[in-house]
Image (cartoon, helix red, strand yellow):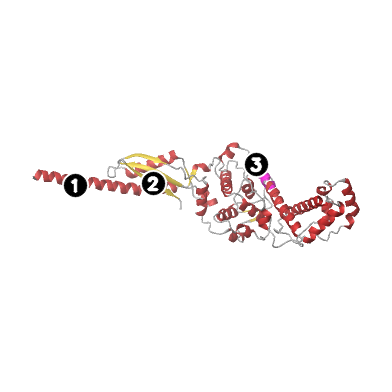
Amino acid sequence: MLSLAFLAFALCMAGAIDISRRLAVKSEVNSYGRVWSGAVLSEYDRHLVEDYRILAYRGLDCEIASKLKDYADFSMKGLMNAKISGIDTNLYGMELTDPDNFRMSLKNSELSSSISALLGSGVRHSRPASEDELFGRRVIRNKAVLNSLPSRGDSSSVNLDGFEDTAEDKSEVTDFLGSLGDSAIEMAYIYQYFGSHNECTGDKPTLLRNEWEYIICGKADDARNYKSVKNKLFVMRNALNLAYLYKDSGKRELIITVSELITPGPAAAATQAIIAEAWAAIEAAEDIRTLDKNGRVPIMKSDDTWKTDIRSVLKSDDVTGKLDDEAKELLNENIDQISDDQKGKGESISNGLRYEEYLLILLSMTGSNTRILRIMDLISINMRYRYYEDFNMSEYHTGVGFSIKANGRQYDFEENYE
């Protein structure tokens, strides 16, 4: 009886010791697993943090698995006879190039200011005149670099159809940005960290001069991005000017009168459209010249801010090239009788929008995913230009996930930057 009692007691003690050992191993693995996760995350790229406030570390699955094994061998050796039989990493879904992960990084980047608040801040300044004259003409031709960019040549563009209909009741850039929601963080980030043709941020070198223009157009040619944006601004201003011409009774009556004078009869309706479109385009070209000089152009024109007169329009090829010989003869005979009192003062406008403010509108109209991918492109390009020739954002992660098998039991861990 005593032997049986002693045996039962010994078995109970052994069971209790085994349970205690398992609990201790579980506690140790869980504790060390969090420590190892923190160790991996602590190896973030300091240049990404310093330049763009982005927390991410570089590492492939096999590299992280090797590090974790070293950590486990050092930490668990001899502790409660814990036997690590396998470590598997899974970084899928934690890539920095995932738009959702990058958006989360932006939210965690300490960028709390709204775009309207940043518009009045001093984070941007005019570009110095001493910049290299080739700056703004660079072209990325290396196929390996282009293929490694997050956007991989995404050719999505801004759609300006119907823009004039939504712009009639807006006069400030904040009127267009007020309903962006979560995208406002992206816009504020662009405003704070990337330059445009006329303005820059900070003093660190960038490969491209026209970074805002790149986000809008996505071309590998810096000069083509600038040219393409100006074309988009011309289309935008042309549509707004045409809408104003039909809205303004004085100019509309003048166009009708001139059309009936040079093409009497049914043809006058077609001539009206020709003159209106040509006048809007000539005014738009003047608007682009004003923006090039860092002047201001209001969203919707008025009598005082309209710059061109109808005589210059009637003498242009856009009009004369579409008239028949009889209409041209009537135009030449009556050109001196046509009044140009519908020309405005064309004075500098203090409440109009500058070039960069028009670009903010185009940026807000760019698709959110396209905008995010091209932001990542610019970061990749500048990291290559400043620090690493082989920088590839697809190798960077915003979190770490792995599983450990200890004493036959699996433990799963997942940690992300917060």
Write down the region rendered in magenta: 220-227
SS at mark 3?
loop
> Can residue 403 be seen?
yes
Residue bearing mark 1: 13
SS assignment at label 2: strand
Numbered label attached to residue 282: none
Which label sits on residue 139?
Answer: 3
In the rendered image, the residue lying farthest to the front is: 266
Picture coordinates of residue 368 (x, y %)? 57, 50
Amino acid, disc 2: Phe
Q: Nearer the viewer, mark 3 or mark 1?
A: 1
Residue at the extreme top of the image, as rendered: 143
Observer-nearest residue: 362 or 65? 362
CB-based contact (under 8 Å), mark 1 and mark 2 = no
Q: Secondary structure at mark 1?
A: helix
Amino acid at the residue labelled 1: Met
Q: Nearer the viewer, residue 228 or 166?
A: 166
Q: Nearer the viewer, mark 2 or mark 3?
A: 2
Mark 2 is surrounded, within 10 Å at the Cα level, by few (under 14), some (14 to 19) or many (20 or more) other residues, namely some
Question: What's under tag 3, amino acid-wise?
Answer: Val
Residue pictured at 73% horizontal, 52% vertical:
238
Q: Is residue 29 left or right of residue 210?
A: left
Q: Position of residue 99 (x, y in %)?
A: 53, 47
Q: Mark 1 and mark 3 in contact (Cβ < 8 Å)?
A: no
Marked residue nearer the N-terminal end (3 or 1): 1
- Counting from the top left corner in percent of width and height, residue 261 is at 87, 54
Q: Which residue is mark 2?
A: 413
Q: Which of pointers 2 and 3 lies earlier in the amino acid sequence?
A: 3
